[in-house]
Amino acid sequence: MGRAAKAGMRLGLGELIRAGGRAVSKYTGTVLAVFVVQSLVALAAMLAIAVVLAQAFAHLPMFDDAVDGDLIALIYCVRYGRPSFLAIGGIVFGAILLWQLASWFLVGGLNGVLGQRPEGRGDTARCFGASGATTYLTYARLAVCSLPGWLLVLFAFGTGMNLIAPRIEHALTLPQLLGPILLATLPALLLLHFLWTVADYARIELTLRHDSHAPGVIATYVRTLIYVLKRPLTLVHGGFGWLAFLLVTVAYAYLAQGHPMYGTEGAVTLFFVRQGVALLRTAIKIGVLAGQVELGRMRPLPPRRVEVKVDAKA
Amino acid sequence: MLRRAVVAALVLFACGRDHDAPRVRPAPKPDGSAALRGGGAPRSQRIANYKIDARLDVAKHQITATQTLTWTNTGQSSVDRLPFHLYLNAFKNESSLFMRSSQGTAAPDAWGWIQIDSVQVAGTELVGKLQKAKPDDPDETVVELPLPAPLEAGKTIEVSFKFTAQLPEVHARTGYVGEFHLVGQWFPKIGVRVGPPGAERWECQPLHANTEFFADFGTYDVALTVPGTYVVAATGVLALVREAPGGTRTFTYHAEDVHDFAWMADPYMEVMSGQAKLEDGTVEVRVVHRPEQKDFARRHLEAAVGSIERFSAWFVPYPWPILTVIDPPVDAAMTAGGMEYPTLVTTAGDTVFARPGVRLPEFTTVHEIGHNWFGGMLASNEPTEAWLDEGVNEWADAKVMNDLYGPRTSGMDWMGWQAEAAALRRAVVSDPGSLPSPIATAAYAFVDQRAYAEATYITTMRALRTLEQTVGPTRFAAAMKTYAKKFAFKHPTGRDLFETLAEELDQDLGWFFGPVFQQVGGMKLGLRTAACRQAHTPRGVFGEGSAKKIVTDTDAPDAGSFVCEVVITNTGTIHVPLDIELKFADGSSQRVRWDDRGNGNWERFVVQRSSPLTEVRIDPDSKLWLDSPTTHHYRIEGDGDASMRAAAWFSSTAQTLMQIVGP
């Protein structure tokens, strides 16, 4: 158990962030393993997309111009290769869906490792696999349990946008456009962040207390809702994580500006540069997760499920 | 306290600020200039001349007016009836042709109409004699006035009206939004006599969703009475301003050699001015705009000044001393923006997405100003030959935009994205081959508005660009200038344009005009075959009997050169001579020409070179704008580099989304 997480101590934002840093540096192999899996999915998607595009455009130099930022060529290519771009949409959607399904295993494994803190690669790997496998279905049930919340977010978003639609329809400046959008979507964004944080902490609770208390999914979700409401630190900490994620993404986009769509030259360079950015973001997300586990282990214990075992011989 | 301040700031940030209450403006000074630059003789026949005295009730959005029309029968046959457009009745109900053809409707209190309260000829009241042009049709946009006695050729008649015009909530570039009033097509307007001398007929089409206007030139003297808080802009020059009872003010405008009169009244508008310098003087350019649209007004002004200078230099000089650009309020721009009237146009495109460099606002201004030439001076029959003003103007706009903003950046120059205006417009529409009607179709006869717009505007521009590139831009420009000079202040037809171009370019262009303007089909170029083989003398069995000889690979080895065969097809109906560029592995290239006129729908080219073919480029100079160029450039061996780079971008985006939903 870390210094900050000793019983009776109240953790602050600084401790949570430091816990994240410590965990990322200690479990570099785990971070890299998760990242490699993610990169493989991205690589597979890239190769599939490349094949689809090459089928349509390998013989048409106009596509080279489009990739180099010729807007007119891009419009022609999109119109000409519409089925290819639909197929690419399907590949991207499939990759995200696959990653969502995989993430229940990966987050379960990460929560297990960060909670139990095994030493050595072998123990870490075993802990990762065991935890991920054990909690997979529980996480899937939690995802189903979270659905009404996400629908509520969609409703809040739609309502907010409907309210401001007439005003932004005639916006002349960026503040006139972004101001109302920000205000209108703020409730939905806050709700989204709240529910996201609840789901994070509920998963941690379900992992940490899986063996000792076997908490029910719905009960855990409801308890975590109350917990997050009572501990705004959870929201602030998660918010910092998203902010860091956003900053890295925006910084890359800014640096890539002037190279429309495609940044630096060459597929290999592009892939590796972007993987660097992705690795940084993975580290941020795992760091946040580590802080959440640190805080999660301080939560009051859930009610223990009493199982009566009947010994036939007795 | 701090929390309240933050909330208040956020609300202000989100909601913006409304205008202050309207205030009485200082009366503007009359323009003090003649209606035509440099005065001089009338430029037109001045067949239809109007004197109107109108009063705008801004609360009811209603105009009450008296009008005297002085019309001259310049034909060689007599006239026994006068047809009048009552355009505002297009917005009277859902049974009007306009509403039927646009599936349009309006809110209960937003309909517009015009009612003739009195019409007199020589003191005789004739309002009861007015009759609909087509009694069985519910449309009320054309009425006819039977005359008590035929008007002989060369005679003039004076017709006096009293009418009430209810403006609609702005529809098809006329009406009101809030306190903004754009008043176009608002008075009883006489039709045009067309046809050969002695067999003239009236041209007075009902208003259809696709059609615009056609009228004779004349003079307009129009007095407009509005509240003193209102700014007014109108066709012509401001001749007189006087205070009127009830806190109102009367503005009197005078215009010569124009075929329409439109005006705007609004209590919040400001005016930004500039000057266009022509060879024979200057033109004052005014952009009338709301204060919050000042940044866009600057862009419109720059575009307006530049376009007047270029249209004047390339066609005929702008003849009037003032041109006014109305930049409608943003909530009226969709329906009030983008319309042309003589010396007064409305623009559009003011939106947050039109960042500097995204030249939609500029293009709109250039296009509408261009109509002062194509439509304004070259007053073709818009309902029956809309392409002659819209399409020819579109072609000219592209030249103006390229000259003003650069040929590669005239449409967009923003965040690294660059595009030519005309190329951008061409890229987003259907190819001519997919259009169900040819260009030369009456506006009201197109199957739908999309077909009308794509054929009339873009396909005409593509056709003229193709012809221009084929015959040479300099010669084509000179021919178009001749057309403009010859038919300014007249009613040219498509035939006039074709004949002038053929004459000036000194060639029979029937092979082009017929298929392009009068037939459906388009141009569909394609590469059917492109392959090379090693050259060698023929192998095989030659001769008979004892003379039979077998020539093998050894006897006839490869010569070290390649025989390349390329087959180009054109399965469309438009055939234009074109170049084909062949590129070879050693970096060399060769051009071949296919005079694709009457030579079938395909052509085979065989060349022998020292290295194999690598690329085929149909129309390497991009002269042909009547086909999609996507497959015009073909690489023999596929190259997946660009596909990989694009795939890397897509997968990176996918990975970002993956990282949002998972670790």
Image: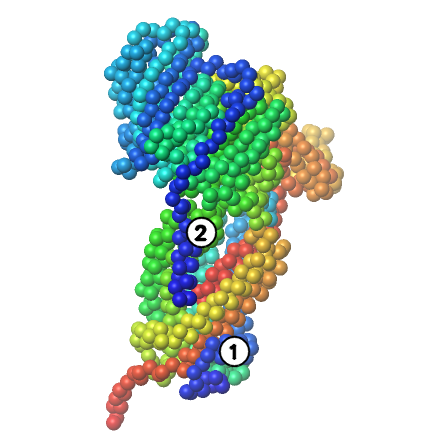
**Residue A286, image x and y in percent?**
49, 72
Residue B172 vs residue B573, the one in the foreground: B172
Residue displayed at 56% across by 28% down: B283
Residue type beneath disc 1: Arg
Label 1 vs 2, first from the N-terminus: 1
Residue displayed at 45% across by 25% down: B240
Q: Is residue A148 visible?
A: yes
Residue type beneath disc 2: Gln
For mark 1, give the secondary structure: helix
- Circle 1 packing at 10 Å, graded few (<14), some (14-19), many (20+), is some
Label 1 marks a residue whose chain is A
Q: Quadrant of residue B662?
A: bottom left
Q: Circle 2 is placed at which residue position?
A: A176
- Circle 2 packing at 10 Å, graded few (<14), some (14-19), many (20+), is some
Q: Circle 1 is placed at which residue position?
A: A18
Do dots 1 and 2 share one subunit? yes
Residue displayed at 54% across by 83% down: A120
Residue B613 vs residue A111, the one in the foreground: A111
On screen, residue B636 versus residue B138, left or right, reads right
Relative to A300, does residue B571 appear above or below in the rendering?
A: above
Relative to B224, does residue A82 appear above or below in the rendering?
A: below
Q: Are marks 1 and 2 in contact (CB under 8 Å)?
A: no
On screen, residue B604 versus residue B79, left or right, reads right
